[in-house]
Amino acid sequence: MLAGLLLWELVGRFVVKNALFLATPSQTALALAKLWSEGALQHHSWVSTQEFLLGFALAVALGIPIGLVTASWRRPAAMLNPWISGLYATPIIALAPLFILWFGIGIWSKVAVVASLVLFPVIINTDAGVRNADRQLIEAVRSFGATKLQLFTKVSLPAALPFILAGLRLGVGRGLIGVVVGELFGARAGLGFMITQAAEVFNMPQLFAGVVVLAAAGIALTAAFQAIERRLVPWNFE
């Protein structure tokens, strides 16, 4: 990582030599310090954090139950799977202006964008996890007279858990993209809004500062989910 930062600094100083095209790590750090001292970084980060957390929580609350239903019952799966496949393939960037029209430029349009991007990886991974349960183990548990609830809690859910957590990790990156996309189309605050403002006046250090904060958030959240995964499904790391 340090080698990458050093290379970035050297390229910015001696190859590009123009801050309008590439801000160096030192210039980005100074921009971050200035934004922090002004309170702008905290304000924009808090707005984006709210949008991400609400959208992510909504997607998880909807996605896991839907994935469990589509994996467990054929009729709901036949009804929902074409919609899931079609909407998953739809570029959400094309729907972002529609969400802003419906919910305004406040926080809820960004929540809708984040939720729509995170929802489908969670559904698909949950569905795949339940279907991936060992059929021989299921038959063995049934032969001992297990109820459907016991079968679900003792076999299907543990089998699906690694897939669900993988879907959540995928959702982190997509959710952060959703925050920025929503704020690019219309916002009063947020990191995407800050990046847009910086781009309009060619303030590359401030633009890179916003990008660095988003990248750091992505790294931290992914690491947190990996730690949760190690705790909940340790057999995957043996």
Image (cartoon, helix red, strand yellow):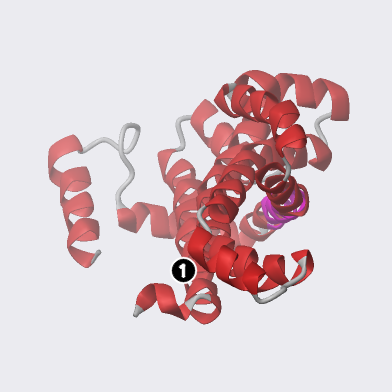
Nearest the viewer among 115 and 198 is 115
The residue at the point 61 percent across, 47 percent down is 127
Q: Position of residue 40 (x, y in %)?
A: 66, 54
Q: Amino acid at mark 1?
A: Ala
Residue 113 seen in render:
yes
Residue 174, compared with residue 184, is above or below; it is below
Residue 177: quadrant of the picture:
top right
Q: Quadrant of the N terminus?
A: bottom left
Q: Nearer the viewer, residue 156 or 148?
A: 148
At x 72%, y 74%, the residue is 145
Which residue is the site of mark 1?
223
Q: 205 or 151, which is in the foreground? A: 151
Query: Where residue 90 sits: x, y (%)?
Result: 59, 21
Name of the residue lying farthest toward the left: 14
The percent position of residue 16, horizontal first and vertical second, equals 19, 36
* SS for dot 1: helix
Q: Is residue 212 above or below residue 199?
A: below
Tell me if 177 is positioned left or right of 8 in this view. Answer: right
State which region is magenta.
Answer: 46-58
Residue 81 falls in image quadrant: top right
Quadrant of the snapshot with the C terminus: bottom left
Determine the main secondary structure of the stretch shown in magenta: helix
**Residue at position x 67%, y 25% in the image:** 185
Q: Residue at x 86, y 30 (%)?
A: 103
Q: Residues within 10 Å of mark 1 (few under 14, many from 20)?
A: few
Indicate whether residue 47 is drawn in magenta: yes
